[in-house]
Image (spheres, rainbow, N blue to C red):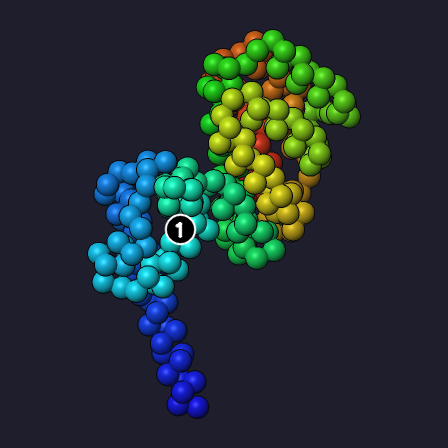
């Protein structure tokens, strides 16, 4: 039993040391302003500089590799890489393991993004984009002056808006948020609407995008998303 406890203490101490080395390495990368493709010192050099074993350095570097901060190159050793931020994030964005508070906040981020994309849309829209949006809304069922929600229509229409922005990072983020949005919508964690409410339809948004201003679109999108804000805040 004493031996087992000693092994546990050693594991904790080693883990703590690896944590500190990892933090030191990240700080080193920041302080030296290293960029993608730049080489970093060898394991032996890092071990000597930090006063730890190569095993500890190797474990810390492994963590950085998992994070996508470094990678191994032939003849160059470990080099800085451009991390796949969303690849790393995607592994943790599982709606079944995230807390309700986190899911709600991610849902809020999606709403804020779509209201805030107006200027990008107006700078980068093309006639072909408007035509495609028209085609998308033509395949949706007729709507009245009241809110009609369908997750498939939302994904198709709003996905095209993200595409028009031309912002690849935003598009990747939107794809990550879609499963969370769908989950939150169907989970019951948001307040149910008592009835239908007036709203700006997808077709109305296309009209605004074609003939209005960025400010008009911001206001139109805010009204389009009104029901979601009501469900969030009552």
Q: Residue at coordinates 53% horizontally, 56% vertically from top-left?
A: 99
Question: In the image, is 220 to the left or to the right of 77?
Answer: right
Q: Relative to 69, say whether 169 is above or below.
A: above
Q: Residue at coordinates 39% horizontally, 60% vertically from top-left?
A: 59
Question: In the image, is 184 to the left or to the right of 76?
Answer: right
* Location of residue 107 (image quadrant): top right
Report helix, strand or loop for mark 1: helix
Which quarter of the image is occupied by the C terminus? top right
| Most distant residue in the front direction | 75
Neighbour tally class for label 1: few under 14, some 14-19, many 20 plus, Cα within 10 Å: some
Residue 127, x across and y down, in percent:
60, 9
Which one is in front, 5 or 79?
79
| Most distant residue in the bottom direction | 1
Kindly identify which residue carries mark 1: 64
Which quarter of the image is occupied by the N terminus? bottom left
* Location of residue 203 (image quadrant): top right
Which one is in front, 197 or 108?
108
The total number of labels drawn is: 1
Q: Does residue 8 appear anywhere in the picture?
A: yes
Which one is in front, 49 or 108?
49
Residue 117, x across and y down, in percent:
49, 25
Question: In the image, is 197 to the left or to the right of 29?
Answer: right
Q: Relative to 215, say whether 100 is above or below.
A: below
Q: Residue at coordinates 61% horizontally, 15% vertically from top-left?
A: 129
Q: Residue at coordinates 67% horizontally, 28% vertically from top-left?
A: 156
Q: Relative to 32, say whether 23 is above or below.
A: below
Q: Does residue 230 appear anywhere in the picture?
A: no
Residue 106, x across and y down, in percent:
51, 44
């Amino acid at each position: 039993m004493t031996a087992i406890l000693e092994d546990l203490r050693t594991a904790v101490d080693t883990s703590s040391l690896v944590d500190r080395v990892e933090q030191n390495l990240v700080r080193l990368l920041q302080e030296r302003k290293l960029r993608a493709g730049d080489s970093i010192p060898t394991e032996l050099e890092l071990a000597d500089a930090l006063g730890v074993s190569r095993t500890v350095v190797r474990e810390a570097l492994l963590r950085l590799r998992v994070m996508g901060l470094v990678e191994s190159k032939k003849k160059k050793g470990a080099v800085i890489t451009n991390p796949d931020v969303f690849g790393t994030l995607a592994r943790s964005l599982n709606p079944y393991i995230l807390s309700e508070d986190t899911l709600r906040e991610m849902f809020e981020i999606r709403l804020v993004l779509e209201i805030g994309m107006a200027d990008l849309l107006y700078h980068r829209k093309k006639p072909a984009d408007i035509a495609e949006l028209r085609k998308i809304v033509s395949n949706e069922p007729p709507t009245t002056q009241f809110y009609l929600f369908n997750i498939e229509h939302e994904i198709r229409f709003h996905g095209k808006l993200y595409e028009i922005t031309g912002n690849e990072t935003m598009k990747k983020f939107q794809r990550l948020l879609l499963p969370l949005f769908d989950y939150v919508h169907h989970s019951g964690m948001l307040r149910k609407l008592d009835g239908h409410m007036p709203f700006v339809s997808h077709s109305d948004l296309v009209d605004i995008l074609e003939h209005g201003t960025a400010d008009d679109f911001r206001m139109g999108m805010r009204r389009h998303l009104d029901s979601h804000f009501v469900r969030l805040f009552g």
